[in-house]
Amino acid sequence: MTGVAVIISVLVLMSVLVYRHQCLLRDRARIMRDAMRHRDFSFRLPTKGLLFGERALQEALNQMGHDIEKLEAHNEVESWQRLTRVLTHEIMNVMAPIQSISQAYLSDPDIKDSPYKEGLQAILDSSSGLTVFVSNYRKMTQLQAPVMRDIDFAAFSRSIASLYPELKWEIDGPADMTLRADEDLFRQVFINIVKNAKEADARKIGIRYSESRISISNDGHVIPDDVAREIFIPFFTTKPEGSGIGLSMSRQVLMGQGYLLRLAEHSEKNHNVTFILEW
């Protein structure tokens, strides 16, 4: 009788464990389904507690989400590039003769003291301002080709920190990590992110890195959800004097070197904003 009770107890315990495990798998499936529905491909679910086959499947799903996220960002950048090339070409075709004709009329002595001068000057100023705006568009499609080489990332991080001694820096990661990238372009990306953080009143910057990702965090103002969805769109800005091309250009620069730049849904501990750089 005791032996039967033990067997029954073991079977009940196994049933409970199997049921709990199946509930865990069901919850994982729900999380991934919701992430896909909301086009959030940044989900990374842990593999601890899974059987070897389930672990392999979860790792594949995590990698698939990462690959989809990179592909979507790449397609978005390409779409903006194509639109930018068309717009810059068409706008410059219109602006060039407007500027030329208005300048010619303004240099005419008969126009100099006439009531037409003010209107012509306004036309010239407006067309010149639009030309400057279009020049910013062109920067989106005329980035230099990267010159790839190995970068000592620990030394690179310290060099960025030295540019902003007024900030408190927290840098954490393996001392021997190297990245294959264009160092000059990489530096411009980091400077742009830090500059944005300073403009958001950040006083502390944290860089944490491993063999698969880098996080760049700050304690500046929290980015509202409606703004977070738009920050990588070219020319979107919340700053009165901002151009709105910094983050979109940074993503494009990194994409050309095999990296993905995104805003983390949840910031690192003791920080308000975290950007993630993955490969």
Image: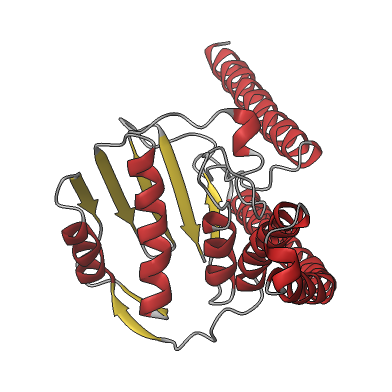
Please report the residue visible at 19 percent of the width from the left and 63 percent of the height from the top: 158
Tag count in the figure? 0
- Residue 66 in the image: above or below residue 254: above
Is 33 or 77 nearer to us in this picture? 77
Foreground residue among 96 and 77: 96
- The answer to whether any part of residue 219 appears in the image is yes
Q: Quadrant of residue 88?
A: bottom right
Q: Which of 179 and 58 is in front in this view?
A: 179
**How is the model colour-coded?**
secondary structure
Residue 162, image quadrant: bottom left
**As drawn, 49 above or below 15:** below
Residue 67 at least partly seen: no
Q: Nearer the viewer, residue 198 or 226?
A: 198
Residue drawn 81% across the image and 76% down it: 97
Residue placed at 63% from the left, 70% from the top?
135
For residue 228, side relative to residue 174 (left or right): right
Give the percent coordinates (x, y) of residue 128: 66, 64
- Give percent across and percent down for residue 22: 70, 30
Q: Quadrant of the N terminus?
A: top right
Q: Where is residue 86 in the image (x, y as percent from the top left)?
A: 83, 72
Q: Is residue 36 above or below residue 277?
A: above
Q: Is residue 73 left or right of residue 277?
A: right
Q: Tell me residue 28's x, y (percent).
A: 67, 35
Q: Which residue occupies 74% across, 59% down?
A: 72
